[in-house]
Image (tube, grey):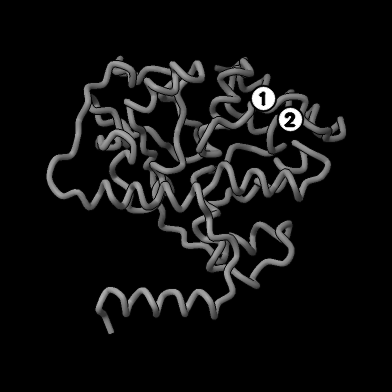
């Protein structure tokens, strides 16, 4: 443990002495992957001994929470991934965060896209899935992802606020180990599942299917959330957004 700390301190000193350069390697994103998942997979595949090394590599920063809708250091990662940081940031936002769900309601707030991430966060809700120790995982998706991509990962569609089921399999999403109830997500720590077993020995790939019988509403909502992520509205003029809501309210028979 002491050796790991010394290595982390040494790495940090080197960062202060050597100018920050573009990343030579950052794991490619998988379909619908969260930024937490992508960073954690990078940690696994890079062979870094401690998590602080991965945060230094990607963000040139000490460990911080990645569970926000838009992590505060995402702009720094975009700068390091590509010199054209605006395009890199747009790719990260659209592909690895829940930003597409909130963008229609932020018209006129941020001009241009590369504006201060702190200002972006100040206009976004904070009480979302993942911010308070929850990260949602579908074991069936993990199995399919291993066959398709060689390893499992965490899907954005499972982390939309209010989603409790997998849109594809209709299974209940897990946020903790079914055996010891240890949560998957810890503050300022990288996710360990589905790549590593829980400390009690439970493995995601050995999990039994646990569907949610009863009301079809949770499944319908999960599919609706997934559709919004795949076909985002983009920035919408406030007047058009208001008219769309009013028309739909009348169609549903409400006043």
Task: Assign a secondary structure to mark 2.
Answer: helix
Residue sitting at x 69%, y 38%: 59
Task: Assign a secondary structure to mark 1.
Answer: helix
Question: Which residue is label 1 attached to?
Answer: 8
- Please give left or right for residue 221 compared with residue 190 in the image: left
Crowd band around label 1 with a 10 angstrom C-alpha radius: few (<14), some (14–19), many (20+): some
- Please give left or right for residue 120 compared with residue 138 in the image: right
Residue sitting at x 50%, y 34%: 189
Question: Which residue is label 2 attached to?
Answer: 12
Crowd band around label 2 with a 10 angstrom C-alpha radius: few (<14), some (14–19), many (20+): some
Q: Nearer the viewer, residue 243 or 90?
A: 243
Q: Nearer the viewer, residue 60 or 140?
A: 140
Cα separation between marks 2 and 1: 6 Å
State the image quarter where residue 9 is shown.
top right
- Please give left or right for residue 154 compared with residue 2 in the image: left
State the image quarter where residue 38 is shown.
top right
Residue that protrudes farthest toward the front in the picture: 251
Q: Nearer the viewer, residue 112 or 193?
A: 112
Q: Position of residue 49 (x, y in %)?
A: 60, 17
Quarter of the picture holding the C terminus: bottom left
State the image quarter where residue 155 is shown.
top left
């Amino acid at each position: 443990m002491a050796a790991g700390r010394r290595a982390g301190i040494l790495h940090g000193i080197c960062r202060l002495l050597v100018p920050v350069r573009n990343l030579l390697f950052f794991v490619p994103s998988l379909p619908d992957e969260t930024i937490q998942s992508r960073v954690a997979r990078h940690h696994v595949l890079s062979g870094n001994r401690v998590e602080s090394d991965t945060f230094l590599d990607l963000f040139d920063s000490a460990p911080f929470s990645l569970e926000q809708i838009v992590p505060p250091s995402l702009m720094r990662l975009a700068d390091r991934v590509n010199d054209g940081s605006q395009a890199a940031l747009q790719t990260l936002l659209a592909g690895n965060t829940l930003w597409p769900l909130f963008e229609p309601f932020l018209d006129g707030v941020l001009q241009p896209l590369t504006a201060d991430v702190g200002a972006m966060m100040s206009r976004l809700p904070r009480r979302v899935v993942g911010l308070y120790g929850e990260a949602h995982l579908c074991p069936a998706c993990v199995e399919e992802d291993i066959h398709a991509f060689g390893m499992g990962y965490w899907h954005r569609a499972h982390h939309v606020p209010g989603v409790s089921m997998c849109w594809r399999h209709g299974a209940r999403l897990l946020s903790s180990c079914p055996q010891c109830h240890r949560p998957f997500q810890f503050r300022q720590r990288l996710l360990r599942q589905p790549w590593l077993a829980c400390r009690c020995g439970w493995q995601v790939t050995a999990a039994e299917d646990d569907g949610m019988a009863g009301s079809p509403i949770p499944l319908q909502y999960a599919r609706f959330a997934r559709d919004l992520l795949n076909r985002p509205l983009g920035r919408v003029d406030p007047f058009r957004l208001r008219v769309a809501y009013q028309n739909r309210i009348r169609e549903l028979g409400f006043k």
